[in-house]
Image (cartoon, rainbow, N blue to C red):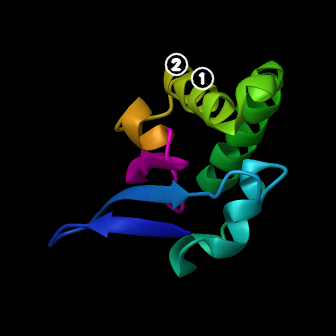
Amino acid sequence: MTWVALDAERPLSLSLSMRFGSFALPSEVAERLPKALIHRNVPGERIQAFLQAMDKAWLEAAPLASFGNRQRWTAMCRSLRDGGWPVQDGPSRWRLGELTVGWDAVAPG
């Protein structure tokens, strides 16, 4: 599931919620993107760069899979944040399979 948080003037963030065990790569959420982003998942667009960064961080966290997908997802989120993506919230939300990123990082270009 995905959703966009809004205020009265503009979008603020994009949130993703994934059920552990229901995906091989986090980018599979692309088919659930909001209409403003779904057709922008193409080379050169920010949303595609973000989804690719998620997949890369997910694959790099593969050694943690033996401790469960929660640990792997949390490591992926931390890696994205450390890599400069404006990841919001923290481990308490990440452990639920959620990830929120600032809208400017994924907004159509």
Label 1 is placed on what type of residue? Ser
Q: Is residue 39 visible?
A: no
Label 2 is placed on what type of residue? Asp
Residue nearest the observer in this picture, 91 or 16: 91
Residue 4, given in percent of the width and then of the height, sits at: 39, 67
Label 2: which residue? 82
> Residue at the left extreme?
8
Tell me the magenta residue range: 95-109
Disc 2 secondary structure class: helix
Residue 75, given in percent of the width and then of the height, sits at: 61, 24
Q: Is 31 included in the stretch rendered in magenta? A: no
Crowd band around label 2 with a 10 angstrom C-alpha radius: few (<14), some (14–19), many (20+): few
Q: Is residue 94 above or below residue 24?
A: above
What residue is shown at x 40% (from left), y 54% (from top)?
103
Which label sits on residue 79? Answer: 1
Residue 61, given in percent of the width and then of the height, sits at: 75, 24
Residue nearest the observer in this picture, 88 or 50: 88
> Residue at the front extreme?
67
Rendering quarter of residue 18:
bottom right
52 relative to 85 in the view: left or right: right
17 relative to 92 in the view: left or right: right
In the picture, which quadrant includes the N terminus?
bottom right
Q: Is residue 85 above or below residue 103?
A: above
Residue nearest the observer in this picture, 74 or 104: 74
What residue is shown at x 50% (from left), y 50% (from top)?
98
In the picture, which quadrant includes the C terminus?
bottom right
